[in-house]
């Protein structure tokens, strides 16, 4: 796995349905390295601090391989890295083989997988398509949030190397599908297994607790 692009943004104010809202979803690739700290990438801003940034969602990663699929689905050949609001665009990054609690070395950092990404309406704004959030959910490949175990500088071109994994964990894709796909016959088992993981974010612990009885 390789870090293809690092993407950040400042908070912006836009008009949406007659109201002014703030967002940090319009990420743009940067040149050079960047310092990754406990709560976010240095210089990157989030507007909704309840749902973005912080210890368990310090960095959002998305696969570069997903872009060709979305260029076709959205009929938009101009999608550039950062279009999905991701901080890190990574090649070979497959949610089906990335597990909750997996730790990766990248540059000077160590990052740990904490949860899947759940899209909100702002993804539709960023992609200029109101159907995008629902389409995103149906794909089950929505990217990964990281917490920062070791701070440091990363640079585009750095390799991601898995250095630790949690026994009996669940993949990010299977967990996301278990929560959102009512026809998934393994859903209860996967959610019950995920609830046993200390490395799962508190947000998702709460989500699953309401489903697993």
Image: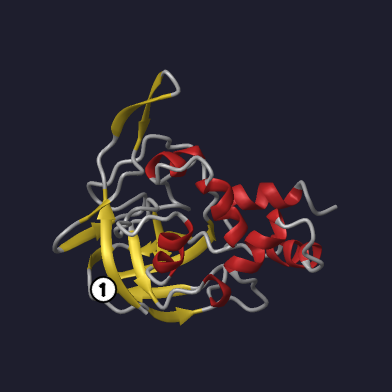
Q: Is 181 displayed left or right of 150 in the figure?
A: right
Using the image as rendered, state which of residue 201 and residue 98 is in the foreground: 98
Picture quadrant of residue 197: bottom right
**Residue ranking furthest to the front:** 75
Q: Position of residue 172 (x, y in %)?
A: 58, 66
**Residue ranking furthest to the right:** 213
**Residue ranking furthest to the left:** 32
Residue in the image at 68% along x and 64% along y? 194
Q: Can you say whether 11 is above or below 147 in the image?
A: above
Q: Is 108 displayed left or right of 138 in the figure?
A: left
Q: Position of residue 25 (x, y in %)?
A: 36, 43
Coloration mode: secondary structure
Q: Can you say whether 164 is above or below 79 in the image?
A: below
Q: Position of residue 81 (x, y in %)?
A: 30, 60
Q: Can you say whether 7 is above or below 97 in the image?
A: above
Using the image as rendered, state which of residue 166 and residue 34 is in the foreground: 34
Picture quadrant of residue 123: top left
Using the image as rendered, state which of residue 79 and residue 188 is in the foreground: 79
Residue in the image at 50% along x and 38% along y? 121
Residue in the image at 26% along x and 73% along y? 107
Picture quadrant of residue 155: bottom left
Quarter holding the N terminus is bottom left
Q: Can you say whether 102 is above or below 123 in the image?
A: below
Label 1 CA crowd tier, 10 Å (few <14, some 14–19, many 20+)? some
Q: Which residue is mark 1?
A: 107
Residue in the image at 43% along x and 37% along y? 49
Q: Secondary structure at mark 1?
A: loop
Using the image as rendered, state which of residue 174 and residue 37 is in the foreground: 174
Q: Is 187 displayed left or right of 148 in the figure?
A: right
């Amino acid at each position: 796995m390789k870090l293809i692009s690092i993407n950040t943004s400042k908070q912006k104010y836009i008009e949406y349905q007659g109201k002014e809202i703030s967002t940090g979803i319009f990420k743009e690739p940067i040149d050079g390295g960047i310092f990754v700290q406990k709560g976010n990438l240095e210089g990157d801003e989030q507007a909704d601090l309840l749902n973005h940034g912080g210890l368990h969602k310090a960095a959002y990663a998305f696969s570069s391989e997903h872009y060709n699929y979305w260029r076709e689905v959205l009929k938009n050949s101009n999608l550039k890295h950062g279009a999905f609001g991701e901080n890190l665009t990574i090649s070979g990054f497959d949610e089906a083989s990335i597990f909750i609690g997996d730790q990766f070395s990248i540059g000077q950092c160590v990052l740990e997988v904490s949860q899947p990404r759940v899209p909100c309406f702002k993804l539709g704004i960023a992609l200029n398509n109101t159907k995008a959030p629902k389409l995103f959910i149906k794909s089950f490949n929505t990217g990964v949030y990281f917490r920062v175990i070791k701070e440091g500088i990363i640079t585009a071109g750095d390799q991601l190397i898995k250095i630790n994994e949690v026994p009996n964990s669940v993949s990010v894709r299977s967990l996301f599908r278990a929560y959102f796909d009512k026809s998934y016959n393994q859903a209860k088992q996967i959610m019950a297994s995920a609830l046993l993981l200390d490395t799962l974010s508190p947000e998702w612990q709460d989500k699953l607790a309401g489903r697993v009885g």
